[in-house]
Image (cartoon, grey):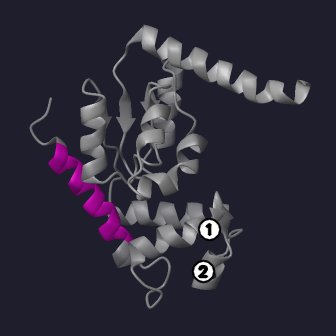
Amino acid sequence: MTKHLGPIRRRLFSFKGALRVKIRNRPKVFAVGMNKTGTTSLDGYFKSCGFITSPQAIFEALADDYHAGNWEEITRAIRRYETFQDNAFANATEEFLNHLVREFPRSKFILTVRDSEEQWYQSLVRFHSNVFFKGQTNITWQDVKAVDYIRPGRIYDLMISVVGSEELPPYDRGAWTRYYRDHNERVRRRFAGDD
């Protein structure tokens, strides 16, 4: 009997959190800058201001749903919190941004950027090297395929979607900086002229 209390407590906590968010009735705040642009620092600032911040792990677990265009569970999770950063917001498509605006019309969107594409690229490579590859610097596609993060192949899928094929190295500078630049331009274009 007691083994079922964990899921019950989690549901109760989730319900209480959602109720608190509903009662407070604050606009949602989405940090839509790419990872490694200060989004974690911004999340810390939100926490210090008393916002109900979303745990990144929830949205990382829903990454495959996001990429499949199945946003129902993501939308449900968003309703339980006030601020958001990184997955799936750091690589939001224009369609997903439009979905967020429709579902949460009072929302605010913050695009965080680095001083340069090169600075962002170096930070990303350094972070990935430390987190996924134990400090290794000469990373191959075999190394990427061996990473088991959230699910086997998740990091490979992300990286191949950015780089395009294994004919280029996993951290091809041109592909990654283009990915960063395209994302920033997409967000700016989507919100051009908005308050």
Can residue 140 be seen? no
> Is 16 located above or below residue 46 in the figure?
above
Left or right relative to 73: residue 32: left
Q: Residue furthest top?
A: 23
> 93 and 195: which one is in front?
93
Determine the main secondary structure of the stretch shown in magenta.
helix
Residue for point 40% across, 46% down: 89
Left or right relative to 74: residue 105: left
Left or right relative to 82: residue 142: right
Circle on res. 38:
none
Residue under label 1: 129
Which residues are the magenta region?
176-190
Q: Locate residue 82: give its quadrant.
A: top left
Residue under label 2: 139
- Disc nearer the start of the sequence (1/2): 1
Q: Locate residue 93: give its quadrant.
A: bottom left
Residue 21, position in %: x, y? 47, 16
> 65 and 144: which one is in front?
65
Q: Residues within 10 Å of mark 2 (few under 14, many from 20)?
A: some
Residue 158, position in %: x, y? 48, 67
Residue 160, position in %: x, y? 46, 76
> Is 15 located above or below residue 182 in the figure?
above
Label 1 amino acid? Ser
Q: Residues within 10 Å of mark 1 (few under 14, many from 20)?
A: some
* Residue 160 part of the magenta segment: no
Q: Residue furthest front?
A: 1
Can residue 37 be seen? yes
Left or right relative to 11: residue 55: left
